[in-house]
Image (tube, rainbow, N blue to C red):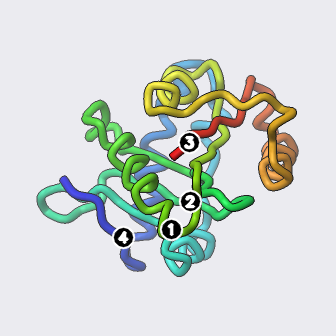
Amino acid sequence: MHVRAVRLDELPVLQDIERAAGQRFLDIGMPEIAEDEPLPLGELARYHRAGLAWVVADDADTPVAYLIADRVDGNLHVEQVSVHPGSARRGLGRLLLDHLAAHAPSEGASALTLTTFTQVPWNAPYYARCGFQLMDDSRLTPGLREIREREAAHGLDRWPRTCMRREL
């Protein structure tokens, strides 16, 4: 398996990966998250054009995991990382995060950030194992505060959420 930039014709595959990965939320009583639609193709295309969308491709060069990121307050912010359940538990999420960390210096970024659910095992606890640390709300940058406000307006604060940061 290898990391590469996503191709424009693969954007529907990213949506399929996210839908499949989201089904795990049904098992922990978060059906609203499982049923939440992935980003529209136009939004995914924006990440593609920005050069901030990568996939892990299998031996047949088919995407099985992806990561998209934004530039937020001088750092790279993980907008979404999803692994198809059929390829889960193989280190693919970490591979994508490490790829983003290796890319960050070319963007002038000194850290990676993300927002996540605190009580979902494959969210905050997983990211902590990948080198991310919880951020106190007093340390949030304006861009991160705006992201959290959008998430709250979307109803994500129904479950405990946090911002995390990985220094590079």
**Residue tagged by mark 2?**
69
| Disc assigned to residue 5 | 4
Under mark 4, the amino acid is Ala
Mark in front: 1 vs 3: 3
**Residue tagged by mark 1?**
52
Q: CA distance from mark 2 to mark 1?
A: 5 Å
Q: Helix, strand or loop at disc 4?
A: strand
Name the N-terminal-most of marks 1 and 3.
Answer: 1
Name the N-terminal-most of marks 4 and 3.
Answer: 4
Residue 157 versus residue 16: which sits nearer the camera?
157
Q: CA distance from mark 1 to mark 3?
A: 19 Å
Under mark 2, the amino acid is Ala
Q: CA distance from mark 4 to mark 3?
A: 23 Å
Locate residue 38 relative to residue 23 in the image: left or right: right
Compared to residue 102, the image places residue 4 above or below, namely: below
Residue 70 versus residue 140: which sits nearer the camera?
140
**Residue tagged by mark 3?**
167
Pointer 2: residues within 10 angstroms few (<14), some, or many (20+)? many
